[in-house]
């Protein structure tokens, strides 16, 4: 009787913590790998690998040196390393990115520094204002005839 009542609040607490944002404050330095299912805000320094299924926000004072894997990321700070995103990479005017980037979508504000090799995956869509060219009929090629001689 008492044990079933005490389990219900614990389950709710576990569900709430998985959706809360993880914060690495300014002045904090973490050396090592971080894995999380929730979103991140980084205003400090991380040297290592960060892997999350949530959104990552790097503040103006934030810096990551290593590999970042996630869904979406908003950068105001600095990044050096390999960045792998399944969604959108958004670079604000104060952002400074160096290294290798793999993303589906890229948004860059004027003033951002983007010194990286970038590969974008996803489907290629035709532009709505671009006219489609009609396909030209192919000319038949005759291979069994000899070229004619001219005298």
Image (cartoon, rainbow, N blue to C red):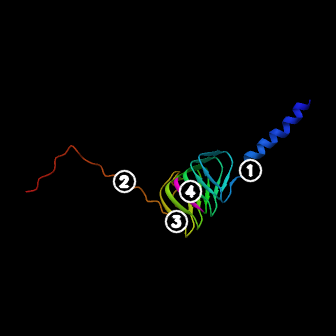
Single out the residue that lies furthest toward the top: 1
- As helix, strand or loop, the secondary structure at mark 2 comes to loop
Name the residue tied to disc 4. Answer: 105
Tell me which numbered mark, 2 or 4, is placed earlier along the sequence: 4
Q: Quadrant of the N terminus?
A: top right
Instruction: Give the side of residue 125 with respect to residue 140, left or right.
Output: right
Task: Sort mark 3 into few (<14), some (14-19) or many (20+) by Cα contacts within 10 Å.
Answer: some
Q: Position of residue 81 (x, y in %)?
A: 51, 53
From the image, state whether disc 4 or disc 3 is nearer to you: 3
Task: Sort mark 1 into few (<14), some (14-19) or many (20+) by Cα contacts within 10 Å.
Answer: few
Single out the residue that lies furthest toward the right: 1
Tell me which numbered mark, 4 or 3, is placed earlier along the sequence: 4
Q: Which residues are drawn in magenta?
A: 77-81
From the image, state whether disc 1 or disc 4 is nearer to you: 1
- As helix, strand or loop, the secondary structure at mark 3 comes to strand
Q: Position of residue 109 (x, y in %)?
A: 57, 67
Q: Position of residue 56 (x, y in %)?
A: 64, 54
Q: Which mark is residue 113?
A: 3
Question: How far apart are the two marked residues, 4 and 3, measured between alpha carbons?
Answer: 17 Å
Name the residue tied to disc 1. Answer: 20
Instruction: Give the side of residue 54 with respect to residue 102, left or right.
Output: right
Tell me which numbered mark, 1 or 3, is placed earlier along the sequence: 1
- As helix, strand or loop, the secondary structure at mark 1 comes to loop
Name the residue tied to disc 2. Answer: 137
Tell me which numbered mark, 1 or 4, is placed earlier along the sequence: 1
């Amino acid at each position: 009787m008492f044990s079933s009542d005490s389990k219900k609040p614990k389950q709710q607490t576990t569900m709430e913590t998985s959706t809360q944002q993880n914060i690495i404050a300014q002045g904090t330095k973490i050396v090592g790998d971080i894995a999380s299912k929730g979103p991140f805000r980084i205003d400090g320094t991380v040297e290592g690998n960060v892997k999350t299924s949530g959104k990552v926000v790097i503040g103006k004072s934030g810096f990551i040196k290593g590999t970042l894997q996630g869904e979406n990321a908003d950068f105001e700070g600095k990044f050096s390393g390999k960045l792998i995103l399944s969604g959108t990479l958004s670079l604000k005017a104060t952002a400074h990115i160096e290294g290798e980037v793999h993303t589906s979508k890229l948004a860059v504000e004027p003033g951002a520094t983007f010194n990286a090799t970038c590969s974008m995956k996803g489907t290629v869509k035709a532009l709505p204002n671009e006219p489609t060219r009609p396909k030209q009929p192919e000319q038949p090629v005759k291979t069994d005839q000899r070229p004619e001689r001219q005298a």
